Image: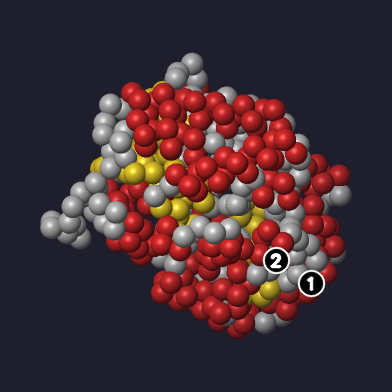
Amino acid sequence: MMDSSKKRVKILYISQYFPPEIGATQARAFEIARYLVKQGHKVTVITEFPNHPSGILPKKYRFKFFQKELMEGIIVWRSWVFATPNKTFITRLAFYLSFMLSSILVGLFTGSRFDIVYATSPPFFVGVSGYILSRLKNARFVFEVRDIWPESAIVLGELSNPRLIRWAEKLERFYYSKAEKIIVVTRGILNTLLRRGEPPEKLLLIENGSNLKIYANRGQAKKIELNLQNKFVVGYFGIFGLAQGMEQLCDLVNNMKNLPDVHFLFVGDGPKKKMVLDIKHRKQLTNLTILDEIPREEIAEYISACDVTLVPLKKRKLFTSALPSKMFDNMACERPVILSVDGEARKLLEKAGAGIFVEPENTTQMMQAILTLKSNPHLCREMGKNGRAFVEKNYSREKLASKLEKELICGIT
């Protein structure tokens, strides 16, 4: 319920990714913006024309520079971006820089004054848009860090040029110095910035979570529809990306293809999708079903069709501070999680009693965890219920957005 005594603010929210695109970044931005609108704040979002991760623009957005829309009370300005299915270092750089430039120009077209400019990164250059528009609009600059960049790009091999690395690190420090508040999504990122000397009072932890109205146990109807009712279904939902170790997941499927009652369901898109499809065809993985991205309003039906879910990342020290949002969505659907992410995510999963941790990139341990849960339906149900209860108590999107409003929006106005 809206508090009539509360001061209303005008917020410019810059997020390169936003619905109808599907993903953790998009969901987080939309849920926060929608909550703030419900509380009486005016929220304007600047985002790209939908294309991620396919790199293909829908016909209705082609040959346009910008378009204004309204989504559940959120004013959404979509701007031109250089999009292509061909993902190379140069095309990715053009993709990010084109949005940086177009978002600044579109920000000028809005003609509005704002109290806060909120920029969420990565992509890295969104911070440039946020800072410039905050100065032009005479607004406070808030910078959200969902991933430590350029460090993560270096670890994944996406950035290796020493000169570019030095330049990116200088830009990173510039963002931190100019932001009035720095929002972080994990305690690992928080601790990293504290070690780098950022003032504690400047940092605010707003973790990822799940929309409990969308993500819930929807029963087994979709499992029957997919003709998997007699299978123990292992699901992976999310981006087919560089960090997720899709090669290891394919090895896992291949290692278990002689078990006729175990079936894998992979749902999503991304740069490694073609590789996964090629491996499925080449190795004749009939125990694997691959589906395109599912609208977020329907995805819970597919998660609920699974008996267990996988949340993997590659074995990198950087990822010990990661807290994948898909983990919360799977838990909210009462499905046990087999997690191959050490560090912060592991501690949370074990505290919740909502799944099994396995060593990252260890397909043997992952297979053993699947067989353990397959042989113990009671344990599956118990872990599923534990996960739902834990998310309800600690990681509701609405509660986290409320925390942001209370500690940031109201705190700096």
Q: Amino acid at mark 1?
A: Gln
Question: Image point 60% across, 68% down: which residue?
Answer: 345
Q: Position of residue 269 (x, y in %)?
A: 63, 43
Q: Position of residue 241 (x, y in %)?
A: 68, 47
Q: Position of residue 80 (x, y in %)?
A: 48, 24
Question: Image point 37% across, 52% down: which residue?
Answer: 32
Q: Nearer the viewer, residue 330 or 231?
A: 330
- Mark nearest the camera among 1 and 2 is 2
In primary-sequence order, the first of circles 1 and 2 is 2
315 with respect to 302 (left or right): right
Question: Image point 33% across, 56% down: which residue?
Answer: 408
Residues marked 1 and 2 touching at CB (< 8 Å): yes
Q: Nearer the viewer, residue 166 or 265?
A: 166
301 with respect to 68 (left or right): right
Q: Against 219, is 13 above or below?
A: above
Local SS, label 2 = strand
Q: Nearer the viewer, residue 63 or 372?
A: 63
Alpha carbons under labels 1 and 2: distance apart: 9 Å
28 with respect to 343 (left or right): left
Q: Amino acid at mark 2?
A: Ser
Look at the image and name its color scheme. secondary structure
Q: Tell me the residue that label 1 is attached to.
A: 365
Q: Tell me the residue that label 2 is attached to.
A: 340
